[in-house]
Image (spheres, rainbow, N blue to C red):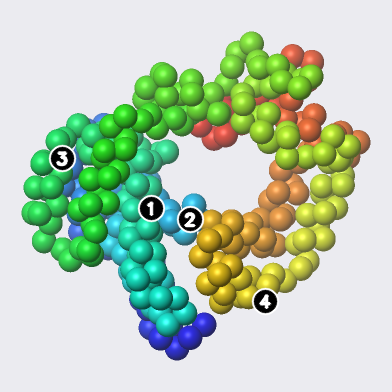
Amino acid sequence: MNGAFLPAAVRVLAALTIVSIGWVVRSAGEPLALKAVVTPSSVIQKDGRTVTFAIHGYIDFQSLAQALVYIEAQQHRWKGKIPDEENRELALRLLREAIESRVVSMADERPLEAVVTHTSNELRQAIREVTEPVPAGYLEAFLAVQSKWRLSLNCWSAAPSIPARVLSNWYPIEEGIALRGAVYDSTEHFWQAMKYHPGITVEQLRALTKNLETMSWQAWLKRLDDDPNLYLPNAYAVEFLRHNLTAERMAWFRNSYPRMGYWRARALAARSNGVPLRFASARTRRK
């Protein structure tokens, strides 16, 4: 990690530990104003909880202002290690990713509703009226997200639209879905099952995660972090590994499996004796 990156990293940490100065949108029942979506400092809450979003899937933010600080830090991080033009393109990609994650939420449909129910001219005007600093490409990124999602469905299991729920991998199918000789509650259950070799048992998985829990991955992750040729094309994978290769996550993973050592791991995702939903996401779990 070079010295130029350290001040920016400190700014990121500071931004992530305080609530941005700006309004907090608390109502879950009322429509969300477009101005709230495009203002960098706004923090959106639903049911008393802050609606977060992420870059690379695992770097969470409460406001776009926090994401902008992170993006600036990334530009400092790679300055001199990659060409300037590539650095600028990286910033634009991260900006687009942050804005799309902010708008297309799996916890709150209101940001997407606010963006797609206004015209592009109304979106332009709303961003022109923002009094806070915004980076180059801010307007263009919002317009690109608006254009894309006017013709798309946010297919998550608690979406307000029934078609969007049905298209979600997590949508529970009452009669089940038969795939490769077993019956699953949803397509997500099938994909989870296919991660494992047919012969792998639960006890073998528990033993593996116990071994992984005792290992230190810091030096290995640092090598990935320091090499732009490795990190930049694989940022999501690296952040996924950073998030999951911790003792806490390994313990959580191990303890999430029942103590049924003789069971095949694939079988846990399939229906057994007609009992549905052996596991479920928080938003599909039945009462």
Q: Amino acid at mark 3?
A: Ser
Image-based side of 201 in relation to 178, left or right: right
Q: Which residue is mark 2?
A: 56
Q: Nearer the viewer, residue 210 or 5?
A: 5
Marks 2/3: CA distance?
27 Å
- Which residue appears farthest toward the bottom when viewing the image? 3
Q: Which mark is residue 219?
A: 4
Of callouts 4 and 1, which one flags the residue occurring earlier in the amino acid sequence?
A: 1
Q: Nearer the viewer, mark 3 or mark 4?
A: 3
Question: Which label lies toward us, 4 or 1?
Answer: 1
The amino acid type, in three-letter code, at marker 4 is Ala
Residue denoted by label 1: 97
Figure quadrant of residue 174: top right
Q: Quadrant of the C terminus?
A: top right
The residue that appears at 68% across and 72% down in the rendered structure is 220
Q: CA distance from mark 3 to mark 4?
A: 47 Å
Q: Residues within 10 Å of mark 2 (few under 14, many from 20)?
A: some
- Dot 3 or dot 1: first in sequence order is 1
Q: Return the residue nearer the eye: 141 or 200.
A: 141
Mark 4 to mark 1 CA distance (whole Å) = 28 Å
Q: Residue at x 68, y 51 (%)?
A: 252
Q: Marks 1 and 2, Cα distance to the nearest angstrom?
A: 8 Å
**Residue 31 in picture, x, y percent from top left:** 21, 34
- Is the C-beta separation of discs 1 and 2 under 8 Å? yes
Q: Of the numbered discs in the image, which one, if any, rests on residue 239?
A: none
